Image: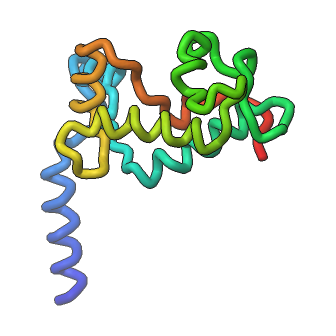
Amino acid sequence: MRMAMMAAGAMALAACSGGGSEVPEANEEVLANYVPPFVMSRLDFGGVVERRFRRLDVNADDKLTRNELPKRLQGRFEEIDRDRNGSISNDEWSAWMLARFDAQDANHDGNVTSDERERARELQETDLPTPADEPAGNAK
């Protein structure tokens, strides 16, 4: 009896599957351009910030100089260097990066979603880096 029930269930499942494993061409095109939703918590972003600081600090002196910053951030050096000592400490870097995160977190729930990132882009704010944007090498 049990075997008959299992066989009937398997046949019903197979019938519901559509009979083939091919994806229609229209769906393939949609899938090829699919970008999964983005959600990053403030806690996760804090880890990204720390790793990014360590990777940018190529001489491992626990501070960033202008030439260690990516070109797109070099013009913001003075903004990040709050104490104006000519270098960016990990605390200054973290405070600046978390302020950017908080500015994008429109509903203040501690997460930045795809929609919130898109809104920030539309307002021409600097986008948050993701782990994929971290510089290669110098991992500690």
13 to the left or right of 64 = left
Image point 33% across, 27% down: which residue? 35
Which image quarter is the N terminus in? bottom left
Residue 124 in the image: x percent, y percent? 31, 12
Does residue 66 lie above or below 45 as drawn?
above
For the residue pair 135 and 62, the one nearer the viewer reads as 62
Image point 14% across, 52% down: which residue? 15
Does residue 31 lie above or below 60 as drawn?
above
50 to the left or right of 20 = right
Residue 63 in the image: x percent, y percent? 74, 35
Q: Quadrant of residue 87?
A: top right
Q: Is residue 21 visible?
A: no
36 to the left or right of 14 = right
Image point 64% across, 17% down: which residue? 70
Does residue 114 lie above or below 127 as drawn?
below
The image shows a total of numbered marks equal to 0
Color style of the picture: rainbow
Q: Is residue 45 visible?
A: yes
Residue 48 in the image: x percent, y percent? 55, 43
Image point 16% across, 79% down: which residue? 5
Residue 78 in the image: x percent, y percent? 58, 19
Q: Quadrant of residue 13?
A: bottom left
Does residue 71 lie above or below 33 as drawn?
above
